[in-house]
Image (tube, grey):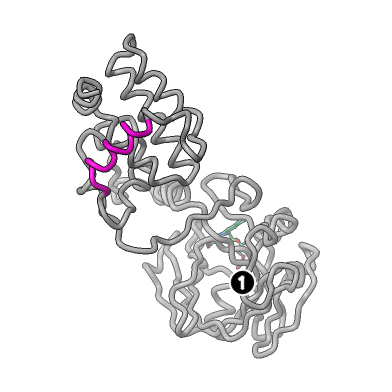
Amino acid sequence: MKVIDPAEHPVPYVHRMLLGGVAPRPIALVASRDAEGRDNLSPFSFFNAFGANPPVVVVSPAYRGRDGSAKHTFENIRSAGEFTISAVSHPMVEQISLASSDYDRGVDEFVKAGFTKHASEIIAPPGVAESPFIMECRLLRHVDTGGRPGAGNLMIAEVLRFHISEEVFDGDVIDPRKLDLVARMGGNWYCRANGDALFELPKPAHNGIGFDALPGHLLHSRLTGNELALLAGVAELPPAAMAHDRWTAGLRDADTLPFPLPEDVTAAIHLWNDPETTAEELVHALLGCVRSCLSAGNLDLAWTCAWIADLETVSRLRADA
Ligand SMILES: Cc1cc2nc3c(=O)[nH]c(=O)nc-3n(C[C@H](O)[C@H](O)[C@H](O)COP(=O)(O)O)c2cc1C
């Protein structure tokens, strides 16, 4: 791994490291209003939510890298103390990119980028009607992280109102498949949260036994970190003896079991019964069974195969048979 001390590099380089590695970042399309009542709209990806009671978000309009001047968004929020954040969905991405242009103070990027204003309930600046999710925010605190070119301004704000499109919200849960949000990566890259990019991972229902409780032959096998994490997520270590019994019973009855075995488990059993198969080949086949049982969600059978997938165990059980 390359080790980089940010103090030894120019700011644009450090900026590139952050943008590349802290990703994907959600994008806040921030609308603010100046003292003369003119609206301003710009995207910011140094943004996130931090706590729900009260609901708090932070967005960071940095001092401009080229001359250290303040961005209009920052000046407006600092003086008015309020702003909206609209989430950015894929059908809006070209428009938000246009809104990020360096227009003069007083230029309304709603107009420049072709967005429609959605009236707020509590504060003056409007949200973006094309967005599926808008927050009305009031500034709680401003933290200046350096006052130099490239330094951030953490605008810590409380969310006063959510406005959520009924097309993505059933009144209880927001459906990520319908939101189609985009996020910012490093360089000119964006990413789109839809299709295969979305997947569900239920929260652990209990404390898992952990990697430190896994048998060494699994820890040092070709199973991936994700696969080992599934095995380490069980509440109790399944007894090895039970797995050995189940495996040997399965061998006897593989073709007469009242339930079907996954294809590669049946294949591993046939290999097991073939005297030409070496112990190494069996371990390889059994680890394949662990992998396919895990991806099929059959943790029980995965653990049975996992307990057998060890050179010493394979040799002993075959010798006993
Ligand atoms: C997707 C995206 C994300 C951005 N994120 C930030 C950010 O987090 N902080 C920042 O200072 N500028 C960010 N920018 C650049 C600002 O949008 C840009 O400087 C804009 O002109 C600021 O407008 P303003 O002076 O009207 O506030 C981003 C630009 C894009 C396209």
Residue 229 as seen in the image, left or right of residue 240: right
Between 85 and 66, the residue placed more toward the observer is 85
Magenta residues (range): 238-250
Residue, far bottom: 122
Please give the name of the residue rendered at 40% of the width and 69% of the height, measured from the top-left corner. Answer: 147
Magenta span dominant secondary structure: helix
Along the viewing direction, whichever of 75 and 98 lies nearer the viewer: 98
Residue 172: in sight, yes or no?
Answer: yes
Q: Give the answer, above or below, for where 163 lies relative to 213.
A: below
Left or right placement of residue 26 versus residue 313 in this view = right
Q: Secondary structure at mark 1?
A: loop
Is 200 colored magenta in this rendering? no
| In magenta segment, residue 246 | yes
Q: Position of residue 194 (x, y in %)?
A: 65, 51
When the figure is inspected, residue 42 is found, relative to residue 120, above or below; the finding is above
Q: Is residue 284 left or right of residue 237?
A: right
Residue denoted by label 1: 173
The quadrant in which the N terminus is found is: top left
Q: Position of residue 86 (x, y in %)?
A: 65, 70
On the image, which quarter does residue 246 sit in? top left
